[in-house]
Amino acid sequence: MSLVVMKFGGSSVADADRIKNVANRVMARRHRGDKVVVVVSAPGDMTDDLIELAKGVTSDPDAREMDMLLATGEQVSIALLSMAIKNRGMDAVSLTGPQAGIYADWTHTKARITKIRPVAVQRELKKGRIVIVAGFQGLNPGRDIATLGRGGSDLTAVALAAALKADVCEIFTDVKGIYTADPRIVPEARKVDRISYDAMLELAGAGAQVMQARSIEVGKKYEVPIHVRSSFTDENGTMIMREDSSTMRSTKGKKMNDSIRNGGTEEAVVSGVALDRNQAKVTLADVPDRPGVAAEVFGALADGAINVDMIIQSAPREGVNDISFTVSRDDLKKALAILERVRAHLKARSVTSDSAVAKVSIVGVGMRSHPGVAASLFKSLASAGINIDMISTSEIKVACVVKENNAEKAMRIAHKTFTLEKK
Ligand code: ASP
Ligand code: MG
């Protein structure tokens, strides 16, 4: 008998039929004798609709009341799912985040989970019930309800799985797993059987939108095996797990030998290609070349809570140089306002921006031990006549900013260069 946390996103509980489908899946699992905890998101687009409602009342909603409002969406789902299960003859109980013992910090609408005391969850499991927990919410130190940031139900599920020492956290979604690239852009993209936490984190940061990035961090920290799979089929999806777990965890000799023969893990040099269109490039031209300038520019942006991604500083000429960097498009307006002040203060020549750019990234833990990956990528992009605007790398990622109208082509080229279509 194992303990499983099953998480269903908004599209899986969007209407009565889908809720009944989820009820059937959950009950089948319980029927096998497993202990089952379910985490659900708000139905369909309800969270977006609630945000719109708030905007209709005020342009600057109070954060505490916003959380009071947003948390209702998940409560709709837990109650309906619990009813559906009970009506089909199994015992279930719904719990809000606070009832489930999920504690959060003071940051309304983007709260972090501080601890989990799943006493009620354990008590209900002992009674043989299916326990249904509202995702995306917890109790803050002021005993108010707090929400965990968009996509926060993933975080609830993974953190709860860690606290309960569950055997697996299953994330049910409308795709079949993690793909080597978005199949809508790269038709040859392939579902991967497993991927490491690190590669998945980089992919999420590079624009892949399957799971909330913070939930993967928590999964990594507590080594929760995460299975991303389809809500509509029984097929296996993708396991997110430790890099070496396929060799470390197999105790049966044969399995271990097989896995060594196959290279230990499936993770080849590159495991995926991601696209992030939410990028804008900003250039500050002719800034004086002296100590403290970069600190002033990026300090001002940081004070404005603007995240900067890539930074390039040109070689100095006659005492000045150019600084270019990227920010998310949503932040561009705010960034330009801040930079205009900085420009005047530094007596730099101009601030210009370009939002018709996108970031294409390749990610893979195998890059650590394979030199030349970046060079192969640049070479293929060059042969296709695609100009690279900016480059950044990490140990397991190479990211290029290109013109937005070249981005999809660049993805297909990268996918092909590293033969990601083949197993
Ligand atoms: N309902 C929340 C949102 O839409 C949380 C979630 O879906 O995970 O962001
Ligand atoms: Mg949602």
Image (tube, helix red, strand yellow):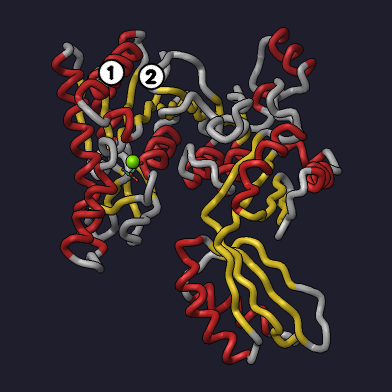
Q: Residues within 10 Å of mark 1 (few under 14, many from 20)?
A: some
Quadrant for residue 178, please give it. Answer: top right
Q: Residues within 10 Å of mark 2 (few under 14, many from 20)?
A: some
- Ligand 2 falls in which quarter? top left
Q: CA distance from mark 1 to mark 2?
A: 8 Å
Q: How many marks?
A: 2
Identified at 41% across, 29% down, the residue is 173
- Expressed as whole percent of the image width and height from the top left, the position of residue 7 reads 37, 30
The residue that label 1 is drawn on is 21
Name the amino acid type tagged 2. Phe
- Expressed as whole percent of the image width and height from the top left, the position of residue 396 reads 71, 44
Using residue 245 as the reference point, say whether residue 261 is left or right of it. right
Identified at 40% across, 21% down, the residue is 3
- Expressed as whole percent of the image width and height from the top left, the position of residue 354 reads 58, 66
Using residue 132 as the reference point, say whether residue 111 is left or right of it. right
Q: Secondary structure at mark 2?
A: loop
Q: Are marks 1 and 2 in contact (CB under 8 Å)?
A: yes
Label at residue 123: none
Quadrant for residue 123, please give it. Answer: top left
Using residue 159 as the reference point, say whether residue 197 is left or right of it. right
- Expressed as whole percent of the image width and height from the top left, the position of residue 305 reads 47, 70
Q: Quadrant of the N terminus?
A: top left
Identified at 72% across, 53% down, the residue is 393
Q: Quadrant of the C terminus?
A: top right
Name the amino acid type tagged 1. Asn
Identified at 28% across, 31% down, the residue is 121
The residue that label 2 is drawn on is 232
Q: Secondary structure at mark 1?
A: helix
Tell me: residue 180, above or below residue 324.
above
Tell me: residue 207, above or below residue 270.
below
| In the foreground, 135 or 326 | 326
